[in-house]
Amino acid sequence: MPKANTNPETENINIRLSEHLLAELDDTWKDRGFNSRSEFIRQSIRDAVNQTQLSAAALEALLESSQQARQGEFVSREEIREEFLDE
């Protein structure tokens, strides 16, 4: 028997999943260290609703960085420290 909704600020919803998808869901929440299926689903929904949006400049910087890495162009830790950290 399902538990009654005791929090007046929440709503219960019902969803239908195939047995295969439900099995994958159960494996995933357990592998990722969640305490329950519901906790995992709530966090997944939060992540989807509050999806981080990257600016065009950030996406361009990521693309450039990826291209440089593929070409073997890397920056040493020392160079990063010198440029960005005041030590």
Image: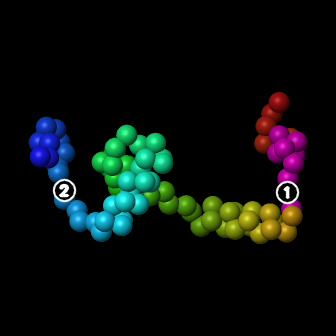
Q: CA distance from mark 1 to mark 2?
A: 49 Å
Q: Nearer the viewer, residue 31 or 40?
A: 31
Q: Residue at x 74, y 65 (%)?
A: 66
Q: Residue at x 36, y 67 (%)?
A: 20
Amino acid type at image mark 1: Phe
* Mark 1 vs 2, N-terminal side: 2
Q: Is the Cβ of the residue at disc 1 closer than 8 Å to that at disc 2? A: no
Q: Secondary structure at mark 1?
A: loop
Q: Residue at x 13, y 37 (%)?
A: 6
Q: Residue at x 78, y 42 (%)?
A: 84
On screen, 66 above or below 83?
below
What is the magenta range?
73-81
| Residue behind mark 2 | 13
**Which part of the image, by quadrant, shows the C terminus?**
top right
Residue 45 % position (x, y): 35, 55
Amino acid type at image mark 2: Ile
Q: Secondary structure at mark 2?
A: loop
Q: Which mark is residue 74?
A: 1
Q: Nearer the viewer, residue 21 or 74?
A: 21
The quadrant in which residue 50 appears is bottom left
